[in-house]
Image: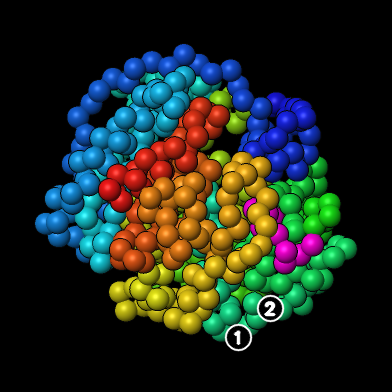
């Protein structure tokens, strides 16, 4: 077990989140272990794109999938980051990646490069015989993409008349206590304007009941005024996850399964994949340091892990195809394959920038705007690159995942990498996202 040492420097939100844990908890903001010497990967032939044997019905495919004008360049770009680059000279950008692009509901390209498992705990470079090649149906820890799923589950409750976006959260969750928090609405949690901090204290407690009580009692940031400023907050989505549980009468993992994954046919989407994935070779590894050993099928986010692997801010695992279905459903105005998940009116509200004119505070990206919908980032060049536009929306995940939807192009772009394998400090995932999105936009 390592101790997080806080020094007087600007910390990324991941480190701030970790600081909210009890002393010594390894995880989201772990002090970086010394980097191992990186070795050139042993090349191996890429397997053919695998049909999702147990996965959901994939978006429609056509002959165009092999001939998208950007397909070759995207694969070339993805392959480049399997080695150190000028912008990341000490380590590869990631061990492996999967990219998928839909346009007008048709898969224009799907490709996989590198390895789902490349390193063992230590981290150590595994011999070629023990590595696992990345597949197009590999199952990733989606990290903060979970927030999009939680937002959708919350908005379903809006459609059902069980909650109102402008209602105080405390109206539904009386344990949501603390000075100034009576002013926080459901919409503020979705838009990250609640003035709640990045993370919450969840350790040093006897059980999950106590941990969740602590989450709900998390105080506002010093000087924070609800509704005025964008501050990315995982705590806010943790609270929404509890709201979903209370008003559906189901645990969050069951609510996800029953209210979203099953209606959409997403058989490769869910929390705690070690319980439902039969072919464990499909699981993509993340961390490989000694604090928690190799993580493969166990959530990377430390707070979610302490909470049992199920929370509103992190913990969902899935494939590129399943993530693309979520993007396509929103692009379709709330429907997919004849199943209505959200009303068209609610989707319109979700995909409208509700933070116009508001200040943004983000230590990782000081130049970013506050533009945000109800559960999705909007028009953010720091990860969308040249595909950014006033109506473009999506989200990113700390493990190296991203979903981007460009309504003007009727396009859904999913990029899933395992950049946190073996060490999340090895690279900046925004570099890879922008590079891939720029190739597609060209």
Residue plotted at (40% across, 72% down): 263
Relative placement, left or right, of 171 versus 73 is: right
Q: Residue furthest bottom?
A: 161
Figure coloring: rainbow
How far from the left and from the top, in percent, is residue 267? 37, 60
Residue at screen point 69% across, 27% down: 1
For mark 1, does the 10 Å Cα neighbourhood hold few (<14), some (14 to 19), or many (20 or more) residues? few
In what element is the residue under mark 1?
loop
Q: Residue furthest front?
A: 357
| Relative vertical location of residue 153 with respect to residue 434 in this rendering, above or below | below
Magenta-drawn segment: 225-236
Residue closer to the observer: 435 or 220: 435
Taking the image as shown, residue 405 lies to the left or right of residue 410, namely right
Q: Position of residue 38 (x, y in %)?
A: 43, 17
Using the rendered view, name the quadrant where residue 249 is placed.
bottom right
Circle 1 or circle 2, nearest the eye: 2
* Horizontal and vertical percent position of residue 43: 25, 23
Specify whether residue 48 is painted magenta: no
Q: Which residue is mark 1?
A: 161
Q: Is residue 270 left or right of residue 289?
A: left
**Image quadrant in which you'd find residue 126:** top left
Label 2 neighbourhood size at 10 Å, few (<14), some (14-19), many (20+)?
few
Residue under label 2: 166
Q: Secondary structure at mark 2?
A: loop
Examine the rendered structure and indicate whether residue 346 appears above or below residue 416: below
The residue sitting at 75% across, 75% down in the picture is 168
């Amino acid at each position: 077990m390592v101790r997080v040492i806080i020094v007087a420097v600007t910390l990324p939100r991941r480190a701030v989140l970790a600081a909210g844990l009890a002393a010594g908890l390894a995880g989201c903001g772990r002090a970086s272990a010394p980097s191992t010497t990186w070795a050139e990967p042993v090349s191996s032939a890429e397997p053919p794109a695998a049909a999702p044997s147990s996965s959901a019905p994939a978006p429609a495919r056509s002959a165009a999938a092999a001939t998208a004008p950007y397909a070759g360049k995207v694969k070339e770009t993805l392959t480049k980051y399997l080695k150190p680059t000028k912008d990341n000279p000490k380590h590869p950008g990631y061990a492996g990646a999967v990219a998928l692009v839909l346009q007008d509901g048709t898969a224009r390209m799907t490709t996989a490069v590198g390895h789902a498992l490349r390193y063992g705990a230590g981290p150590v470079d595994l011999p070629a015989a023990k590595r696992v090649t990345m597949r197009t149906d590999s199952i990733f820890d989606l990290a903060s993409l979970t927030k999009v799923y939680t937002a959708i589950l919350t908005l379903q409750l809006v459609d059902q008349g069980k909650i109102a976006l402008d209602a105080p959260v405390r109206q539904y969750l009386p344990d949501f206590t603390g000075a100034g928090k009576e002013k926080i609405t459901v919409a503020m949690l979705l838009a990250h304007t609640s003035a709640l901090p990045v993370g919450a204290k969840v350790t040093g407690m006897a059980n999950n009941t106590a941990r969740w009580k602590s989450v709900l009692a998390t105080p506002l940031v010093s000087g924070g005024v609800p509704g005025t400023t964008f501050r990315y907050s995982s705590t806010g989505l943790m609270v929404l996850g509890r709201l979903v549980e209370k008003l559906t009468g189901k645990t969050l993992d069951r609510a996800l399964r029953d209210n979203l994954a099953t209606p959409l046919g997403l058989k490769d989407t869910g929390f705690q994949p070690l319980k439902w994935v039969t072919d464990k070779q499909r699981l993509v590894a993340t961390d490989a340091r000694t604090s928690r050993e190799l993580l493969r099928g166990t959530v990377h986010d430390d707070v979610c892990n302490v909470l049992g692997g199920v929370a509103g801010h992190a913990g969902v695992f899935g494939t590129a195809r399943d993530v693309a279905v979520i993007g396509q459903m929103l692009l379709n105005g709330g429907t997919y394959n004849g199943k209505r998940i959200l009303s068209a009116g609610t989707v319109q509200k979700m995909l409208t920038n509700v933070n116009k004119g508001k200040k943004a505070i983000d230590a990782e990206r000081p130049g970013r705007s506050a533009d945000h919908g109800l559960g999705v980032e909007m028009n953010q060049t720091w990860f969308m690159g040249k595909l950014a536009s006033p109506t473009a929306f999506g989200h990113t995940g700390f493990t190296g995942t991203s979903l981007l939807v460009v309504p003007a192009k009727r396009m859904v772009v999913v990029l899933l990498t395992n950049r946190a394998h073996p060490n999340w400090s090895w690279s900046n995932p925004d570099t890879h996202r922008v590079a891939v999105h720029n190739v597609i936009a060209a």
